């Protein structure tokens, strides 16, 4: 049975990031990884495929060259997200890791394994005291759930998430953020 996705609050995401070391190189890398997954709404494979050249901090963009169905797209990343990534880029440069290594890599410049990330996020969640199921796809759902109440147009959310069509995004949002239904039910009164 497939469990429903649990969306994280901004405070829970901050706790997850703070559960990573702020000094150890791997902690700094993991902070950057969480920021990319959360603020860009990327799939785990998309985040793992990013190269340093795919990021443009000045423009506020991340170029996803290997999205689902081998489709490329450009997504936005805010300055706070870029701050985590920039710190990791500085640390990797000090470690002698060149720009030909994936953005999210080991200290030897090798790609971080998907299984590592899948084990990392629940471990950090336990350390942060988060009782929800935390995984990479939950970090993808979270920005979508945040953007909808901010009145961001569904087609913009669709492009950020890389969905093939608007119907997928609408179903996705209905599943993770049924706010219209909740609001309507809260307004009902007993006669």
Image (cartoon, grey):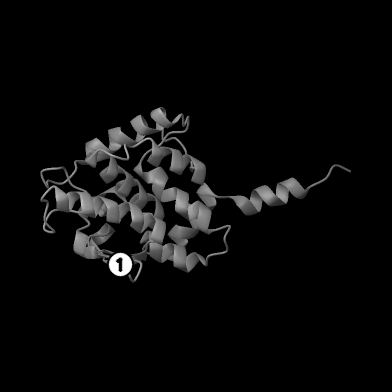
Using residue 50 as the reference point, say whether residue 161 is left or right of it: right
Front-most of 151 and 170? 151
Picture coordinates of residue 154, whole percent (x, y): 50, 65
The residue at the point 26 percent across, 45 percent down is: 29
Q: Quadrant of residue 168?
A: bottom left
Residue 189 showing in the rendered view: yes
Q: Which image quarter holds the C terminus?
A: top right
Q: In this rendering, is residue 30 above or below 153?
A: above
The residue at the point 51 percent across, 58 percent down is: 147
Q: In this rendering, is residue 123 above or below 110?
A: above
Using residue 8 as the reference point, say whether residue 160 is left or right of it: left
Q: In this rendering, is residue 111 above or below 83?
A: above
Residue 9 showing in the rendered view: no
Q: Quadrant of residue 156?
A: bottom left
Front-most of 14 and 151? 14
Give the SS element for disc 1. Answer: strand
Q: Which image quarter holds the N terminus?
A: top left
Front-most of 160 and 4? 160
Picture coordinates of residue 93, whole percent (x, y): 16, 53
Query: Badge 1, how many Cα within 10 Å: few under 14, some, many 20+?
Result: some
The residue at the point 50 percent across, 59 percent down is: 170
Residue, far bottom = 59
Picture coordinates of residue 55, whole percent (x, y): 26, 64
Picture coordinates of residue 182, whole percent (x, y): 66, 47
Task: Name the residue beneath numbered marker 1.
Answer: 73
The residue at the point 47 percent across, 38 percent down is: 4
How many marks do you count on the picture? 1
């Amino acid at each position: 049975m497939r469990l429903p996705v649990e969306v994280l609050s901004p405070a829970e995401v901050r706790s997850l990031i703070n559960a990573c070391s702020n000094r150890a190189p791997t902690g700094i890398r993991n902070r950057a990884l969480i920021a990319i997954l959360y603020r860009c709404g990327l799939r785990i494979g998309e985040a793992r495929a990013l190269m340093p050249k795919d990021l443009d901090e000045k423009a506020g963009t991340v170029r996803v060259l290997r999205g689902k169905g081998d489709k490329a797209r450009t997504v936005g990343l805010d300055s706070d997200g870029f701050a985590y990534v920039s710190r990791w880029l500085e640390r990797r440069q000090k470690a002698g890791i060149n720009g030909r290594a994936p953005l999210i890599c080991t200290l030897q410049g090798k790609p971080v394994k998907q299984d590592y990330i899948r084990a990392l996020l629940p471990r950090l969640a336990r350390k942060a005291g988060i009782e929800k199921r935390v995984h990479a796809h939950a970090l993808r759902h979270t920005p979508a759930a945040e953007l909808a109440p901010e009145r961001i147009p569904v087609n913009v959310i669709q492009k950020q998430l890389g969905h093939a069509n608007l119907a997928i995004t609408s179903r996705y949002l209905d599943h993770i953020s049924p706010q219209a239904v909740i609001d309507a039910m809260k307004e009902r009164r007993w006669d």
